[in-house]
Image (tube, grey):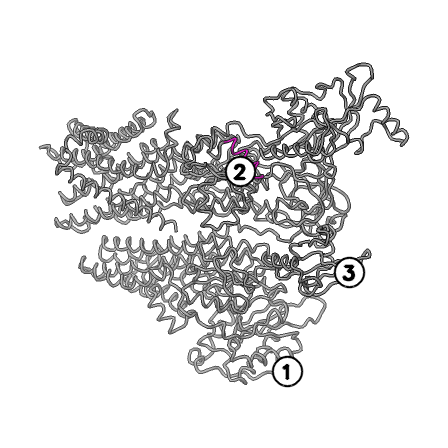
Amino acid sequence: MASLPAPRPSRGLLARVVDPFGVAGGVLDRVDPFRHRGRRVWRGAGRVQIGVPAVVRESGEELARAVEKALAAHPQVAWAAVNAALGAVVVGLADEGEGPVGLPDDETVDDLIDLVEILEEREGGDAVDVATAPLMNAAQQAFTILAADIAGLGVAALGSILRRTPLPTELASAATFVDHQPRLREAVERALGQERADVLLALSNAAAQALGQGHAGLLVDAAYRAMQVAEARARQQTWTDAEPRLLSSAECAAAPADDALAEPRPVPLPLGPIERHGDVVGAAALAGFAGASAVTATLRKGAGVALSTLPKAGRLGREGFATTFGRVLARRGAVVVEPSALRRMDRLDTVVLDAEALTTGVLMLGDLLALPGADGTADALDELVPRVHELFDPEDAAAPRRLSADGEHWLLTGLDDIPGGDDPRAVEAGEALRADGATHVLGLRRNDRLTAVVGVLPEPASAAEALAASARRAGLTLVLGDSEGTGPGVADRAVPGGEALRSSVRALQAAGSGVLVVSRDRQALAAADLGIGVSRADGVAPWGAHVLVGDDLGTAALLIEGVKVARGVSSRSVNLARAGTVLGTIMATAGTAPRGPGLAGLAVNGAAAVSLGNGAWSATELGRRVVVPGVSRTPWHVMPTSTVLARLDVTGSGLTSAEAHRRQRDDPAAAETETSLGRAFLDELNNPLTPVLAGGAVLSAAIGAVVDAAIVVGVTAFSALIGGVQRVATDRAVAGLLERSSIRARVVRDGTSRGVGADEVVVGDIIDLGPDDVVPADCRVLDSDGLEIDESSLTGESLPVPKSPLPVIARTVADRRSMLYEGSTVATGRGRAVVVATGSSTEVGRSTAAARAAAPVAGVDERLAGLTSVTTPLAIASAGAVVLAGAVRGLPFQQNLHSGVGLAVASVPEGLPFVVSAAQLASARRLSAEGALVRNPKTIEAVGRTDVLCFDKTGTLTEGRLALSAISDGVKLRPTDRLRKRQRRVLAAALRATPRPAPGERLAHLTDRAVVYGGQQFDVDPAHKRPGWWPVASLDFDPSRGYHATLGEVDDPQEDGGPFRLISVKGAPEVVIARATSWAGTPLDDEARQRLLEHTELLAGQGMRVLAVAERVLTAEQHAARAADRDTDGADDNTLDDADVADLEFTGFVGFTDPVRAGSQATVRDLRDAGVQVVMITGDHPSTAEAVAEELDVLGRASGATGNDNGGIVVTGTELDALDDDALDALIPRVRVIARGTPSHKVRAVQAFQRLGRTVAMTGDGANDAPAIRLADVGIALGRRGTPAARAAADLVITDDRLETILAALVEGRAMWASVREALGVLVGGNLGEIAFTVLGASTTGTSPLNARQLLLVNLLTDLVPSLALAVRAPEPGSAAALLAEGPDASLGEALNREIGLRAMATAGGASLGWLAAQTTPYGSPARSRTVALTALVGTQLGQTVVAGGGRSPLVIGAGVVSAGALFAVVQTPGISQFFGCTPLGPVAWAQAAGSATVATAASVVGPGLVRRYGPVLVPEGSPQESWIARLEEVRDEATRRYVELQDRAAAALNG
């Protein structure tokens, strides 16, 4: 068949009409590598895809089967499968040689296409439907349009050079108008199809803009098309890389047609910001055209106003994001099947997670519950667990599996099928396992008894939990598609999954939701608005998804987080489109009639360019995010060591060097990127005030005030540069201060032990550990010799934890005694372990990555945004009033417009962000001198807002070490600083029972070190009351033994019996007391033993770790008899064994605690006095936690300062788990201590406080603190002993580890708020005073008393240096108590509003007084009056600045003098004075200005006091004046209330 030429079917009628000679098709075949003979063809190594459009529908199923059968029969074809999602048949070529299969040649492809065309003709379908087949691939299409735009730019440039008359802008913009008007574009798409409409409109626009010489529009369009080309090429490359995996076999490539995949939504997709804006621009264009034409009496200006309404910025902002994000996804290996789905992300609000897609598809063993036998005891886990793993078959979990070994018979099968499975205890255990997520429950039978019930569950994908976290961060509704009906769990709700998932998605859409789905189900993915397809365990892709991510759930999480970013991009793009409309309207009406449309187009294209860049930047930043990696949930701690080694494919001799090299992998999530100055600069510009300032600069340039615009831009950029430099410098300082020394590990490779760097350790490495070694990765213990681990940095537990290779059933990290975790330290003993996780996949690594996730943004920017959102409309309204006043007086419209725009621009407080940044920067520098490094100066304001401070106990409130704290003789407990004789005897005995370290080494056990240090500290030595004591033998501590014993030689006090022996024992109280027979010379009976054990519990309840001490005296005769016995046995008489440790005399107890840091109690008290709720969170036992809290007075019971009768309360992590969010919100204000807290409890506590509107700071030093540190509004880490995870998460690093430094940071934060209030009062109040004065002058004269440059000069002289001096001055010594009363509510609430109002009245009053005085002067000119008013206005503001600074700050006074000198120089210098519209003044004019400023400033100082003092005299009670004033106060209060509400709403809107 392949050798005979096949007849070519004739082309359809439409094809012959459109391209009668087939020229266009031939050209496209040549230029498009993905076209061959008029249809889409893709060639890969050993595969070829041939487009068959008819197979996308179920109606083409017969054709699909025929094509598969015919092509599979071809001699060069191995298999053929139709993929309806691709609209193609995928052909696998036969391997004819030993080498790899190459690209198919044209002859083979022609043969295959001939077969397809014959079958299409036989089935009655056209080979290619010209109306629906793509003209070219996406890259070729974008490149063609880009080439047209570049050619258009060349034509436009040539026309400008040759001075050719351009096409009128109204005509040149016609295609642009149609392209960006949603209604018109929809009509074109319905007529031509989306692809053809895109090409036609783009080419038409390029041609028209070229003839109209529209350089700006062509440049913006070319940039957009270049981004499209880059996106398409990235998609092509990703497909080329992924195709061998996705289409590796007929099973992987097959995707039968399913018409259900193409069903439309039940209701239209909800409109996004861009769609809502587009719906109103048509009417706005008509109204603008009519209104502007009527007002200006010029149709061309009306056309310019109509063009300015184009929403080009909205669409290009979305496109900039989508094209760049498409490239981000391509770099991560995701295949974007339908790029248009990325354009819908801003319209989504719901995430559906298919529970089946969140697993690996492999079953694994979960918990094992041992059942008690007839005697009430259960079999040991170390006997049961290995058998369960040996019997378990993940391929068929419920199938019966039998084993006979060591004379015993074992059976593992389903609980319902095993004898004894209906026993109530077994049924209860099975229900408990199912409630915990087990999908299968098995029974383990040993001989004739059911010994255990085992849970089996699907192995979760490592990054599954990252999806839910991403949905939370994105603010999306989280829905779980669960076919098991286990409930929503962490999701907001659950819906039916499995086969019903598609119907569930449709139901959500019908309810008005935009739905994103993560699944393996084709139908559910196709029904979604954005379907993210996860491959099956066998690698089959879910064809029908919009994006294929394989098994990379991290990319799926990034897509979910991208929804929030896309929303923000669309909102900002719409705002930019509106700003372009306003600017275009002003430029079109202010310019000459012929230039009106062109100026409007310039504004629209400028806004579109900014929007395009903003979208691209946002997508790039999104791609830089580190998605929190998942921790492997494989239950290594439950498995026997043999199973662990088998799963990791390693033997006891370790990995080979070659295998270790193969397993080595890069871990980008674990690497920190250095912040560049450029990025820090852009981050500083990312604040709510930048758009306002940018808009003011553009308005200035639009009216010709280019110098004014440059000044605004320069001030803003300088502010951002200063903040960026501070951030980079601080980050580098933190990196230098906290750089970890390289951690080394001893690994077994090639059968020998060797040292390697921690970053060279791989999964499967076997490591050897000894005292003081740092665990380099998460490991499973293989062998343990007295191994104890310090896990305080991970769990918060201050005492070492013994480790064992025995399997353990444990849910929490702290209880997994068979596991070692990265960053923990070996306290004592030795061990061997196998690595199960490295890098960001470890528990600590995940915390570090979570610390780099986006932190919540809140604070002064929000409040300033609200303030600006109120003052900016006020400035615009005042500008409108100036324009209206001039129009009433008959002044020219253009003059009025220039005056109004000038006022609006000058009213923008250019120094506002600079003042705030400078205040934060100054505070940060002062704190750095006190031992606190601030990563970002913006942290300072958040510190000042803090009203909840969560401390991690271990290492933060305490010193993080074990110390001897109290000693008891069994009756009386005394602290170590008040020891009596009896307690000193106990300490001496404890010292004798402590081993002596080898030379050059230190003691292995922390308790031994604490005893030795205590003896040195309190001047007690082992020979106390035992002269001549010297150790001769010892019995080392062993966990199974529970004590350490020392045999010592002591001089006989009677000096007649020779030296005698003394056995000293120190160990667990229950062990030592059981071996004691006497106490204080009397026999020790059971009642006395019980009293001692109760005394032990009393000490433990006070937060102590308790050891008992006892001794046994061997006289010379007794020692001789003992030696004789040993001689008979052949033993040395100077050895000690367990039999010798008997008949002891109990001596006492020694108690150890983690000592409280010096100054902690005073710091806690000061914080509470400042209104900060202190909460201590610890992993310790509740009694230990409460004892420490009582010592620090955290509970507030001693001082009664907690605001309730009973003080604060102590809760445990378990109690928190039992509370839902509402119950926790009700309880959390009373909580002062959380005991047995895990990282999740810390996070939940922080979230609860934040839900209540509290500002939370979290202080800690361990990896377990990192998630809560990052989530908190202020994260604080202690720098000296802090872990990398905690330091990476922190906003503030305390380098000296002193709590007093935290208090100093709080004082600085509160002082910053006070400084900002004073600076804002002068700054904003001054600007409002300028507005009031300008409006007053315009209403009386018809024009503004001051021009734009004069108003800008006022801002330069008063907004920068004086306000800056107010903001950066240091707090006055001794003012800490007063400053602690400051804060956001006290500083930027009603107090700020009053201050702004007072400054505004004083400023307006001083300027008006000087202006009126100058106008009343007989020889005064208008220029002189303006200059006097300017001078009086500046003088009034400078006077208020000096007063606000307290009149004693040299910095503020100096700034005022500098600004006053600058004003004098500007006014009196010819040329410069005229540049600003001034004239030099004489003595009388200066006196008028100075007098006006002095009177206004004095009135602002003494006026409020005089009113309070003499108000009742001037306005008697009950008088009409009082009711009138009361009514004015009501009006004022109502206006203030609405003003504050408007601020809050504006801040909330700006921050999402």
Q: Which percent across, then down, holds residue 1143?
A: 77, 30
Residue holding disc 3:
403
Instruction: Check if mark 3's residue and mark 1's residue have beta carbons within 8 Å.
Output: no
**x, y (%) of residue 892?**
16, 50
Using the image, determine if residue 1132 lies above or below residue 25: above
Q: Amino acid at mark 1?
A: Met
- Whether residue 1356 is visible, yes or no, is no
**SS assignment at label 2:** strand
Task: Name above or below for residue 1425 compared with residue 901.
Answer: above
Direction from residue 266 to residue 538 in the image, left or right:
right
Q: Secondary structure at mark 1?
A: loop
In front: 273, or 1037? 1037
Q: Nearer the viewer, mark 2 or mark 3?
A: 3
Query: Would you say 1014 lies left or right of 1156 here?
Result: right
The residue beneath circle 1 is 1
Up/down of 1429 relative to 249, above or below: above
Dot label at residue 952: 2
Three-letter amino acid code of the residue under disc 2: Asp
Residue at 40% over, 54% down? 568
* Closer to the camera in the image, 105 or 505: 505
Residue type (three-letter) at the residue carrying disc 3: Leu
Based on the picture, tell me whether residue 1189 belongs to the magenta stretch.
yes
Extent of the magenta region: 1181-1192
Quadrant of the image occupied by residue 278 = bottom left
Query: Quadrant of the rendered structure where residue 254 is?
Result: bottom right
Which residue occupies the extreme left position in the image? Answer: 1418
Q: Can see residue 657?
A: yes
